[in-house]
Amino acid sequence: METLTGPLAGFTPWPDDLAERYIAEGYWGDTVLGDVLRGGDPRATALVAGDERLTYAELDRRADRAAAGFLRLGVRGGDRVVVQLPNTVAFAVVFLALVRIGAAPVLALPAHRRSEISYLCELAEAVAYVVPDVHGGFDYRELAREVVAATGVPHVVVDGDAAEFTPLASLDAEPVPYERPDPASVGVFLLSGGTTGLPKLIPRTHRDYVYNVEASADVCGFTDRTVYLVVLPVAHNFALACPGVLGVWARGGTVVLAPSGSPDEAFPLIERERVTACAVVPPIALLWLDAASWSGEDLSSLELLQVGGAKLAAERAAQVPGTLGCKLQQVFGMAEGLLNYTRLDDPAELVEISQGRPLSPADEIRVVDSEGRDVPPGEVGELLTRGPYTLRGYYRAPEHNARSFTPDGFYRTGDLVRVLPSGHLVVEGREKDQINRGGDKVSAEELEGHLLAHPAVHDAAVVGVPDPVMGERTCAFLIVRGEAPTLREIKEFLKERGVAAYKFPDRIEVTDAFPRTPVGKVSKRTLLARLG
Ligand code: OOB
């Protein structure tokens, strides 16, 4: 059931009976994403980034002024705008401005390059692309030139020195009235971790994402006292909405943006701003556990560390409260929707061994075997889910949707889990052909596609190799023609193809043939076993 025309073309709505139920039971309301700041005291601090501090009133005004600027540029409700901004004030202003006028930001990560961005601009038929000038030593205006040449995206907006493009500062205009978006319309597009050749876009409606944010803020106990440090990319669902930046604003607290999760940068900010909560991926949690013993900073304000994106080992989980002096919360989430959180009052053992339980009473969970039959309670199977904030279809991807959803609308997560008697889930592995590299997701098929374009590569199979710090690292098995390329050459080749660096293999293994399963597919399990 896809809407085929109009601004929502390619979006799969929830069926009427479920939509009515979610409204009647109060999961969905009329609040839109642009309202999210309105909960804060106008004089309270909404955002801290470097030396900049913005009150709720100031951020609200900056967002309205930028909204007027985007309208003047010709951006309209229903349009899509690819936003690729790091953890800066500009992200906050641009995100709020766009959602207020009903133009959906397509949230790319700073690490994405020509291959990803061009594809997103084309798939979303973006009317604009927003970038920083230079960040992390990389010139995004160069990237924008390539993207414009490849896709013809009409406008490029640059935070900073814009060169030939539109400066973000020039969009600062006297506020104008704008039409409030429909809460049922798409508010924002998130990127899927991906299992296919090309990344997928996840449409999140205003009302489902507002519910995601509000319910998460409740479960995590966020209040106007919360001081939340952002160390992950703010464009990632975890840091944005679980409860993230939006959850803090919905409760009137303070968001502090850090450039990265490195203890050198994050710890001084925790001390200076008296940070109370932070969300990290396991490799950062491990760094913090190590650094806490020798760092001189006062971390005593920290009350809650959320860890998710990849599995945190139980032994490490157990060290968090004693070493960092705060509560641990495990978060097993996905941009597609479903969020599982351990609760703040769960017994320590559950917080250590489980990845939490579903956020919403309306989340429906099934655990099934390879034939799609429910497994007996407590056994491992694939997690299927549907609910008031889980997508019903990827954007403009009918064929993929036919595989990724059951006929009755359950999303096949590709994650293998087991359910404890308490209802908490333990993640036991993965069925999807993806590498989880410390929380960064790499689609094996996508990377294999890029590798196959190399003239010396005859065939490629990409697997995740267990790693004590990253959880997994990426190994590419290659069958080559002639002389084998080195890892360095492969990385250089991928860089030239405009592939994000986190997708580069960490290791290559040259082989003569791939082992096959009885049905003739490459047996990645056997390949992995070869590494010993
Ligand atoms: C989060 O979102 P995505 O979309 O980058 O990745 C989702 C996938 C899940 O399907 C699962 O395979 C894996 O990441 N994952 C975990 C996990 N949290 C996510 N695997 C094991 N243990 C965990 N705690 O990663 C994400 C979105 C919102 C909040 C937190 C994480």
Image (spheres, helix red, strand yellow):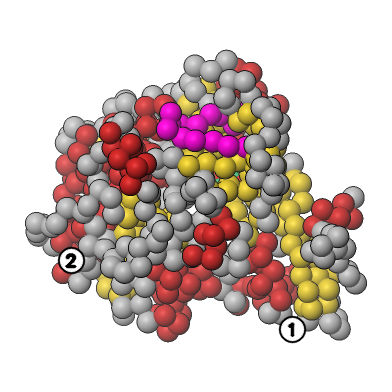
Q: What amino acid is labelled 2 in the image?
A: Leu
Helix, strand or loop at mark 1: loop
The answer to whether residue 530 of the structure is visible from this angle is yes
In primary-sequence order, the first of circles 2 and 1 is: 2
What is the C-alpha distance between the residues marked 2 and 1?
A: 46 Å
Q: Nearer the viewer, residue 187 or 223?
A: 187
145 to the left or right of 19: right
Quadrant location of the N terminus in the rendered image: bottom left
28 to the left or right of 461: left
Residue at image coords 49%, 16%: 345
Q: Which residues are magenta?
A: 354-367
Residue at image coords 82%, 65%: 520
414 to the left or right of 221: right
User: Percent position (x, y) of residue 525?
Assistant: 82, 53
The answer to whether residue 162 of the structure is visible from this angle is no
Helix, strand or loop at mark 2: helix
Rendered image: mark on residue 455: 1
How dense is the environment of label 2, judged by Cα within 10 Å: few (below 14), some, or many (20 and up)? Answer: some
Q: Is residue 42 above or below residue 166?
A: above
User: Percent position (x, y) of residue 399?
Assistant: 54, 66
Instruction: Report the residue marked by disc 2.
Output: 71
Residue at image coords 55%, 50%: 406
Which quadrant of the structure image shows residue 2?
bottom left
User: Percent position (x, y) of residue 181?
Assistant: 21, 54
Q: Is residue 249 above or below residue 68?
A: above
Which quadrant of the structure image shows residue 38?
top left
Residue 441 belongs to magenta span: no
